[in-house]
Structures are given as structure tokens and as C-alpha cells.
Amino acid sequence: MELIKQEYRNILVPVDGSKTAEKALERATEIALRNKAHLDILNVIDLKQFSVSFGGMVDANGDAVYQTFEDVEGYLNTLVERVKKQGLEDVTAHARFGSPRAVIAREFPDDHENDLIIMGPTGLNPVERFLVGAVTDYVTRAAKCDVIIAR
């Protein structure tokens, strides 16, 4: 019996700075190399995090948002260099504002024609997971493409 081989061309790996996300990035890099695929590394900045900070005193148009974007950009550049050192040149980093659930499951894959999403089981601690809901759970239910949970 011959195994069915799935080839992927555009792989998305969302990252949030957690160890599980970085493990997913390692797995995504391996799969992209095997498939000679393009890899999109994505960080979604949820503006809701700023409205609840400091009792709602942070303006979502202010310095805190700009600094967060700068930090994310530096983090993503580090990840791109790491992936390139592993031999994958076809990699692009992206930072987007919005709801992580919607951006990862639908918006970004629609815009970039991703045919696979690889992500960690969760980047949140149990309290955050209860309050926010697990993005991974939502993505596995709502994504139009294949989803791999890297453990």
C-alpha cells in the first residue's frame, strides 16, 4: 500500500514568543525544506491588550503600540535569520494587528494562499486560556486549510 503524500507550497506558522510557538517554527521549517515551500512567520498584535492595560489609560494610537510593533519586528527578524541558518531562504515575516483567531484562521491564509498552518498547542497559561479562549482550538475548527499542532 502506497502512502498518500501531501505537498504544501505556502506554510503559515504563527508565533507569540512562547516555547510552543518556537517548537512549531522548527517543525514548520523542516516541512518547508522537505516540500521546497514558502514559509510565512506571523505575529498578530491584538489591540485589545492595550485597552485593558493600566485601567484603560493607554491610547491604542500611542507610544505603547508603536513600541510593541518595534519589539515584534525585532523578534520576527531574529526568527527569520534562525530559519535561514537552517537552510530555508524562502521565508517572510509578517506582523498584523487584529484578532489572533480571525487573522490566523481566515484573513492571513486567504491573503497569502497558505495551504498549511503549523502552530503550538497554546502560548497562554491556563488563566489566560480561560479568559481569552485558546486561539489554537479556534484555528483547528475554522481554518480552510490543513492545521498541524506541533508538540
Image (cartoon, helix red, strand yellow):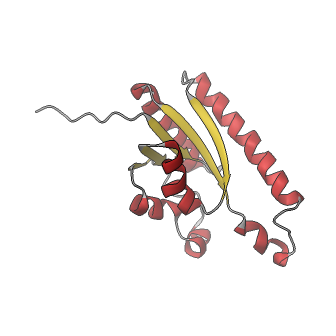
Is 121 placed above or below 81 here? below
Image spot of residue 34 (x, y percent): 40, 26
Is 91 placed above or below 51 here? above
Image spot of residue 41 (x, y percent): 59, 41
Is 35 placed above or below 121 here? above
Is 39 placed above or below 121 here? above
Residue at left offset 39%, top offset 50%: 145
Q: Quadrant of residue 7?
A: top left
Q: How many marks?
A: 0
User: Taking 39 as reference, is 8 left or right?
Assistant: left
Residue at left offset 53%, top offset 62%: 135
Image spot of residue 18 (x, y percent): 62, 51
Of 18 and 51, the residue lying toward us: 51
Of 41 and 119, the residue lying toward us: 41
Of 10 and 82, the residue lying toward us: 10
The image quadrant where one finds the N terminus is: top left
User: Taking 36 as reference, is 83 left or right?
Assistant: right
Image spot of residue 104 (x, y percent): 53, 54
Furthest residue toward front: 111
Furthest residue toward left: 1
Residue at left offset 58%, top offset 57%: 123
Residue at left offset 63%, top offset 30%: 82
